[in-house]
């Protein structure tokens, strides 16, 4: 069984204010005996040969990925290039990409039913044919878990569940993960996921743990965007990327 995390952010993500780099994640992953990682930056594919080389040295398979803005919603695509990301604006674009990739591309519905604007919500149901797997988000506590309905839907539809860290701070990485019964190669991993040969682990956060995650993801990020030039630049870049991703859809609506 391969220990995997398919949803990770880091400092190199141009739209996030993370204070750790991809190399830090790889080193921690090696210490925690992870086998497979996918960095999935917002609208950006990690392109760093040094990180790839480090992962290889540590015995970790690195799969190129991206958290793509599709009609202003977030979708995880694995084995995608930056050129493919830049051409993907609508769910029809995503569907065409998936057809072209065949079994060499994987689409995961991330945190689909969380009450946040960029989450899929109704699009999760409308675009059900697109999902190869459904993410179990790390952000839940006992008695309050927005994953539950998505988990029920996935079970009804025969879709596998994968737990990821969605790490925006280094301490968030490691607890949520998925075990995949496959050889340590990309295509066997994708095939095993589609076949449901997975076990996911997503322990509930303590109330303090949930507060810490929210404080780091929201408060720190917002302060950085208010008080630092880098943070303000990332905020502008994020808005512009979301707008660019929505332009073809808006033009179609006007037509």
Image (spheres, rainbow, N blue to C red):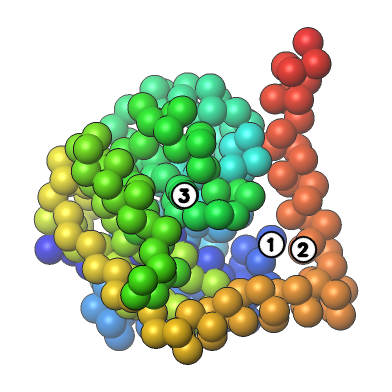
Q: Position of residue 42 (x, y in %)?
A: 60, 54
Label pair 2/1, CB-CB below 8 angstroms: yes
As helix, strand or loop, the secondary structure at mark 3 comes to loop
The residue singled out by tag 1 in the image is 14
Where residue 147 sits, quadrant-wise, is bottom left
Using the image, determine if residue 170 lies above or below residue 200. Answer: below
Label located before the other in sequence (1 or 3) = 1
Label located before the other in sequence (3 or 2) = 3
Residue 137 visible in the shown view: yes
Q: Nearer the viewer, mark 1 or mark 3?
A: 3
Q: Nearer the viewer, mark 3 or mark 2?
A: 3
Q: Position of residue 132 (x, y in %)?
A: 31, 38
Q: CA distance from mark 2 to mark 1?
A: 6 Å
The residue singled out by tag 2 in the image is 234
Q: Position of residue 96 (x, y in %)?
A: 47, 22
Q: CA distance from mark 3 to mark 2?
A: 26 Å
Residue visible at 80% across and 72% down in the picture: 225
Label located before the other in sequence (2 or 1) = 1
Q: Is residue 254 left or right of residue 198?
A: right
Using the image, determine if residue 61 lies above or below residue 229. Answer: above
The C terminus - image quarter: top right
- For the residue carrying disc 1, how many other residues have a C-alpha within 10 Å: few (<14), some (14-19), or many (20+)? many
The residue singled out by tag 3 in the image is 113
């Amino acid at each position: 069984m391969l220990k995997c995390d398919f949803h990770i952010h880091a400092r190199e993500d141009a739209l996030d204010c993370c204070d750790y780099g991809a190399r830090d994640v790889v080193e921690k992953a090696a210490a925690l005996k992870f086998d497979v990682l996918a960095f999935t930056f917002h609208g950006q594919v990690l392109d760093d040969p040094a990180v790839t080389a480090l992962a290889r040295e540590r015995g970790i398979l690195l799969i190129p990925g991206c958290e793509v803005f599709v009609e202003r919603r977030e979708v995880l695509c694995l084995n995608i290039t930056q050129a493919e990301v830049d051409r993907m604006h609508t769910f029809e674009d995503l569907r065409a990409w998936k057809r072209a990739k065949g079994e060499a591309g994987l689409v995961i519905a991330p945190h689909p039913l969380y009450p946040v604007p960029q989450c899929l919500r109704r699009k999760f149901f409308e675009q059900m044919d697109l999902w190869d797997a459904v993410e179990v988000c790390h952000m839940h506590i006992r008695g309050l878990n927005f994953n539950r309905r998505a988990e029920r839907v996935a079970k009804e539809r025969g879709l596998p569940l994968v737990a990821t860290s969605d790490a925006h701070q280094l301490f968030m990485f490691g607890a949520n993960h998925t075990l995949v019964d496959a050889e340590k190669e990309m295509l066997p991993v994708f095939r095993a996921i589609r076949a449901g040969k997975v076990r996911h682990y997503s322990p509930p956060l303590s109330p303090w743990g949930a507060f810490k995650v929210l404080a780091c993801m929201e408060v720190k990020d917002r302060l950085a965007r208010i008080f630092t030039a880098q943070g303000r630049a990332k905020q502008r870049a994020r808005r512009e990327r979301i707008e660019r991703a929505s332009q073809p859809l808006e033009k179609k609506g006007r037509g």
